[in-house]
Structures are given as structure tokens and as C-alpha cells.
Image (tube, rainbow, N blue to C red):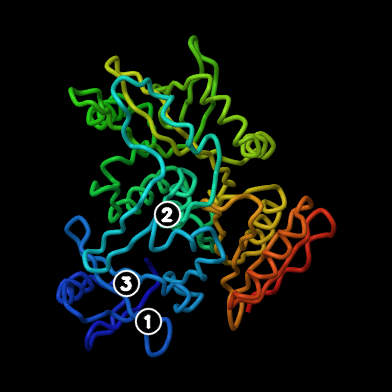
Amino acid sequence: MGHLTFRIGDHIISHDDPRLETLLASVHGTKQRPLCLCRDPGVEMYVARINGRHVIKRMPNTGADHAPTCDAYEPSAELSGLGPLIGSAIQENIQDGVTTLRFDFALSKGRGRPTGTSSPRRESDSVRTNGNKLTLRGSLHYLWEQAGFHRWSPAMAGKRSWHVIHKFLLQAAEDKAVKGVPLADVLYVPEPFSRERMEDIAQRRMARLSQISMGESHAQRLLLLIGEVKEIARSRCGHKLVVKHLPDFPITMDDGLHNRLRKRFAGEFALWDAVDNAHLVVIGTFGVGPTGVASLDAAALMVVNENWLPFEHLYEQALIDRLTQSGRSFLKGLRYSLSDDQPLASVVLLDTQPLPIALYIVQPEAGEDYDAALDSLIAESRLEAWVWRAGGEAMPEIPPAD
């Protein structure tokens, strides 16, 4: 977190003050709570120890208690797909600072079963609401949000690249665990590729992947990949996924998985094809066989714009473009495991007073059930609502910044 000021005991200290680590260490493990001073008299935080360093973290379910201008602010989780997952699929322990995640996809497979034939319940087949576990797409949305890539302000323009994506995704995984295993141990985010460092990068990759190579156990471990798609192409025996920053390491997939991926994420492929500056982000599980060949086991896709902000359709892209071009600050709502026919706030403006404003887009094909669900969501929210019925009307005037 940045741009924060805290009260720790009798001390008032900024997030970038070199004395902060010492102060955090002095209260770690005690009942004393640092206060974020974005509001008076302060919002309680807690201290966690991660990889040998002390960090200050937001208390669970308090994002909306912070000032909208504070980096710790988050709107109510019910405005996105995050709400149903808190406390079940996502369990945060303030005692040790570790967040436990429950996945609905496998991170291992039986030794006798070929990679790519894992389960009929894969993310590539469907996305469904499941408050007990995270789908692949939900996991990608969660890590994207934890890394801060759903957040935008004018100061961020031109500052996001794969180097930044790689760094902050790995940081987001540091305090997460799955089935008692650190998420960082199973997450693979390719480092930025450089032709001059190609051999060194390949050696580091081989060392990383050796952890999941086929051993003598009855189950093979799978890694969780997040990368940018360069292409999905025909191969001699099926198809292959080529990830940017992994140009010399294609990942194979069988025809069945490829066909399901194309069908389930037809909209994402269409957007990626239509929007010149869009990136296609893949999350998937893959294993490495005895020959060293990597095979994709399950996958999901997400389209992001040139600023790495996710968008679901061209109406949302138009809204995000208008906001960024106007110098606005906002949060992008993420769907997680919600089905496409369930409403969520597309964007939450952070630069309006006295409260943020939630922006909703109703697509042309939405029916009466969608309208009723949207009315209920708006009625339960603390935030003022702006609604654009896309296709039937021009984009309404966006509430001005204060």
C-alpha cells in the first residue's frame, strides 16, 4: 500500500518512513492495532510478518470504512463477484496474516491420466457461482485485484508493463496458501523475456519446473500459470499455447481442451481479435512430463486493455476509455465466479464526493430478471448509482470529479 499515514502507539508515521518496519515489529503479535488516518479518528489495521518483513494490512471486511482517496479503500464486496467468496473460498487469518484459498480445480493429477483430461468440471467448460471455492477465472480476478491492477488513477499512465505485472502478482501471492502449501510455491508467472538473458531465463525456468516433474509418487503436481497469450496454434499432434515471455517454451493442449476453451471463451477471443491494443491473459494449470514437455490441464481467459484493466465487452471498454482519457480515478469491478447474467458494478468512481459512485452497464440482451437483480443491488448499496442502458441509449454524462 502507498500514500498512507498511520498512528502506531504515540507515533504518526508515513508508509515510506524508514522507521515504519521497526514500529510494526514492535506491535506485531500484540493486541495493539495501527490506525490508518485516512479518516478521523482512524481505521484499525493489523500487522503481518511475510517473508521476514513486517507489513501493515487492512482488517477483513473494512475496505469501505476507509476514505475513497485511501489506497486501502475498497467498495462493498457485494458490488462485485467477491462477496459470495469471503469467508468460504477466501479465509483471511489476522493472527498469522495468511489468507487461505480454496480452489475448485486440481493442482495434481493421477500418474496414469494424461494431462489435459482432468475433469468435466473444468473452468474451460463453464463458469458458475460457487461461494465455497474459487474457479480459475475467480482466482485470476482475485490475484489481479490483490496486485492492484483493478485500480486506476492518472498517475499510473504509462507505468504498467509485464515487468510490473510479474512483480506485483508474485507479491500478491506471498501471503496466500492453498491446502497448507504457500501459493507462491505453485504459482508460475513468467519473468520478462530478454534475448540477451535467454539462457539464464531458461535455466531458472527449468529449475522451477523441476519441482513438478514426474516423480515416483502416484500423483503429479501441477503449477498454476498466469501469462499473456501470444497465440494458440495448431501443432503436429493437437494445439499449443504460446505465452509471451515464454517464446521458447510452448505448452501443448489436446483438441478437446482447445475446443472447449474456444467455445467457453468465444467472447474473450472476439474482443482480443477486435481491439488492437488488448492483451489476452491466461490462467491455467499445467504439468511437465518425463520428456520435459509441458501440457495444459485446464484454463480460463481474461481480456485487458493497454493499461491492463479488465473489460468484458466493448461498452465497458468505451466507458473505461472515457474515464482514463478524462483523468478519472476508479476501481474496475471484477466478476469472479458470477455468471454473465448477474449484475455487478462495472466501475466505482473514487474522485466523487461525499461518496464514490458505482457505474453499471446494462447490455442490450438483458431481460427483466437482470433488471430486477440490478434494482435490488443498487437498493442495498451505500453508493449512488449511474446506469447506462447500452445499445438503447448513448452513454449518459458521467458524474464529475470533485
The disc labelled 2 sits on which kind of residue? Asn
Query: For mark 3, what is the residue?
Result: 15
- Is the residue 402 above or below the residue 178 in the image? below
Query: For mark 1, what is the residue?
Result: 43
The disc labelled 1 sits on which kind of residue? Val
Q: Say which residue appears at 25% left-offset and 25% top-offset.
A: 213
- Mark 3 nearby-residue class (10 Å; few <14, some 14–19, many ≥20): some
Q: Which mark is residue 392?
A: none
Q: Is residue 284 left or right of residue 96?
A: right
Gap between marks 1 and 2, in whole Å?
A: 29 Å
Looking at the figure, which quarter contains the C terminus?
Answer: bottom right
Near-viewer residue (337 or 319): 337
Q: Residue furthest right?
A: 392
Mark found first going from the N terminus, 1 or 2: 1
Is residue 191 in sight in this rendering?
A: no
Q: Is mark 2 on a helix, strand or loop?
A: loop
- Is the residue 81 above or below the residue 124 in the image? below
Q: Which of marks 2 and 3 is in front?
A: 2
The disc labelled 3 sits on which kind of residue? His
Q: Position of residue 390 (x, y in %)?
A: 78, 56
